[in-house]
Amino acid sequence: MPFPAPRDAAVIDIGSNSVRLVVYRLEGRAIWTVFNEKVLAGLGRDLGAHGRLSPEGVQQTLAALKRFRAVLEAVAPAETFVVATAAAREASDGPAFVARVKAETGLTVRVLSGEEEAHYAALGVLAGAPEATGVVGDLGGASLELVRLETTGAGLGVTLPLGPFSLGLSDGFDGERVRRLCAQRLAPVASAFKTDSFHAVGGAWRNLALLHMRLSGYPLHVVHQYEISAAEALDAARLVAHQSKASLERIEGMSKKRSETLPYAAVVLESLIEQLDLKRIEISAFGVREGLLFEAMPPRVRGLDPLIEGCASLGARQGVADDLGRGLEAWLSEAFATLPPVFDGRDAVLVAAACRLADLGARLHPDHRADLVFEQVLRAPIAGLGHAERAFLATAVYARHSTAFNPPELEVVERLLNPARLRRARALGATIRLGCDLSGRSAPLLARSRLSLDKAHLSLTAEAGYADLLLGEQTSKRASTVAQLLGLKLKIN
């Protein structure tokens, strides 16, 4: 079945610290970023001291918006969202700024209330991780939004003056003073937001996560759904809070403006860990912008699994057989469902996702397919999967193209996957390879055969009139590889 026609959507996000234009390609439930430009304008830099927008920040923001308007005139997205958050909301001259934006750029700005900002941040997290539970925290330049995730979606939300600009950035960083302010401002709401899992949204916390990766030697620098224990996050936050500005600026990839705000973000995280009794922190690359897109999707589309749909989108754009992924899933999922789970209820989703990636290497040189698809899947900006699941799918697509197992980043796989998960990923990839080669990538032909497992055997059979499908050395070779990886004997009849 052909994949739905893509459409473009754009979000202009006027924040307290940055103003950003992101253009997305939407393919059903799959959200792809195709253009992303940010200006650290510091619109809310003077908010804490004077209650007004920074004049310099206003000028930088207006210049950025005029450029963004020019880009959008050419791109012509199907829909555009223009939103502003805490700085425009809280500043005494916020309404005048919004009017000036309209007059000079023609853009109509929607100023989100604190509750709306929290709501969209939570929707963004759910867009990227539908099974997320706990509390979302979205840290911007002027405010922190906290919202509890309920079984029905976004629940209770509050906004607090805990962004760097509201904590006295203009006065210079004083760790003890910032800690006192955080404690005072968190105390009235802390009991309502105690949780084990905290989903951190915002550029400062993404930078903190990247710093933690470097310090800990973590091999996969993908921030989305990067998980840190509370103890490790606390150590990293305290380390950052005690660094000088000059030391932070020497960190690779750290901009001067981000180095000014990072110590404040670190102290806020430290206070949250202590007051909310957090056990683990998960970084979300999705936030308010993606929440706006997610809310605008039809309910049927919102209910789809982002991992399966993202893999289907990726495979459809690079493959040659539209219905192959669904056909493979129908062919092998029943057999794999008899195996002991290795991902706590996620096995069926991962099997479905891997099948959607079966044709990913179809247009690549056969000598390099395995390596190239491994690298692409390991770092693909697909939502709905944790880091171990990334390694699992990357291993599966590698094994789909290669019997020998020597992926380009074996150390990543071995760090993120235990032996049982690694072996299962290889078996899944080998089974997908068997299905593709058995059928010549034809889903209707594949449906004429059956794969089954019992305690001792892997059995491959064919319908009456299709016995010739099972002939050939390659079929036997591919099936033997699967049986060996599953620790079973092979029966072909």
Image (tube, rainbow, N blue to C red):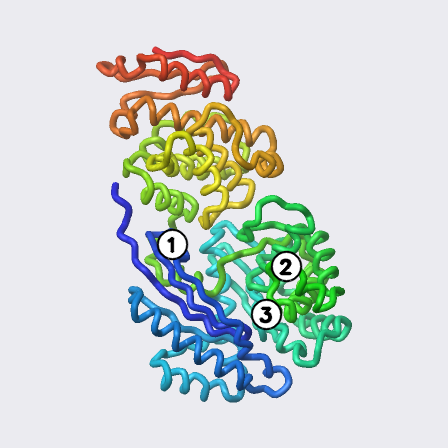
The nearer-to-camera label among 3 and 1 is 3
Quadrant in the picture for residue 317: top left
> Identity of the amino acid at label 3?
Leu
* Label 1 or label 2, whichever comes before in sequence order: 2
Q: Position of residue 217 (x, y in %)?
A: 66, 46
Residue that badge 2 annotates: 208
* Label 3 or label 2, whichever comes before in sequence order: 3
Say whether residue 128 is left or right of residue 195: left
Q: Secondary structure at mark 2?
A: helix
**439 relative to 471, above or below:** below
Q: Residue furthest left?
A: 465
Residue that badge 3 annotates: 144
Which residue does the image show at 36% across and 86% down from the upper left?
103
Residue 302: assigned label? 1
Task: Categorize mark 2 by other alpha carbons within 10 Å: few (<14), some (14-19), many (20+).
Answer: many
Say whether residue 168 is left or right of residue 122: right
From the viewer's side, name the closer residue of 266 and 345: 266
> Identity of the amino acid at label 2?
Leu
Say whether residue 25 is left or right of residue 130: left
Q: Secondary structure at mark 3?
A: strand
> Identity of the amino acid at label 1?
Arg
Q: Position of residue 441 (x, y in %)?
A: 30, 29
3D distance between C-alphas at marks 3 and 2? 16 Å
Q: Position of residue 77 (x, y in %)?
A: 31, 65
From the viewer's side, name the closer residue of 300 and 58: 58
**33 relative to 337, above or below:** below
3D distance between C-alphas at marks 1 and 2? 30 Å
From the viewer's side, name the closer residue of 52 and 186: 52
